[in-house]
Amino acid sequence: MRWYIGRVPKPPPLELRLRALGVEALGEGERSEKVRVRGPEELFRVLDELSPRERGLALIRGLEVLGRWPGPEEGGADG
């Protein structure tokens, strides 16, 4: 362990820290949440292979197919 006398070194930039963790920063208007999903075991195997961004896109596509995703031209996510 290092002990610093005087100035404490600045932490690395956020992008560098996120890259070291294997994640990327959220974009404008994005948020990340945990949700509960029920489905067959195979669904979760496939979801585990997708990145968080890909999982979000897959969910949006599914909601579009079901007619449940309004999209920006119809008032955005808030409806």
Image: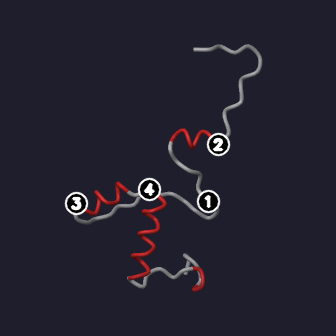
Residue depth check, mark 3 versus mark 4: number of the one nearer the observer: 4
| Residue at the spot 42% in from the left edge and 77% down from the top edge | 63
Instruction: Using the numbered discs, state the Cα–Cα distance from disc 2 to disc 1 in whole angstroms.
Output: 14 Å
**Mark before the other along the chain sequence, 3 or 1:** 1
Query: Can you identify the residue that label 3 sits on?
Result: 41
Query: Can you identify the residue that label 1 sits on?
Result: 27
**Mark before the other along the chain sequence, 3 or 2:** 2
Q: Amino acid at mark 2?
A: Leu
Query: Can you identify the residue that label 2 sits on?
Result: 14
- In this view, the residue farthest toward the right is 6
Identify the image quadrant of the C terminus. Answer: bottom right
Residue 1 placed where, x, y %?
57, 14
Q: Secondary structure at mark 3?
A: helix
Q: Amino acid at mark 4?
A: Ser
Query: Can you identify the residue that label 4 sits on?
Result: 51
Instruction: Using the numbered discs, state the Cα–Cα distance from disc 3 to disc 1 in whole angstroms.
Output: 31 Å
Label 2: few (<14), some (14–19) or many (≥20) C-alpha neighbours in 10 Å: few
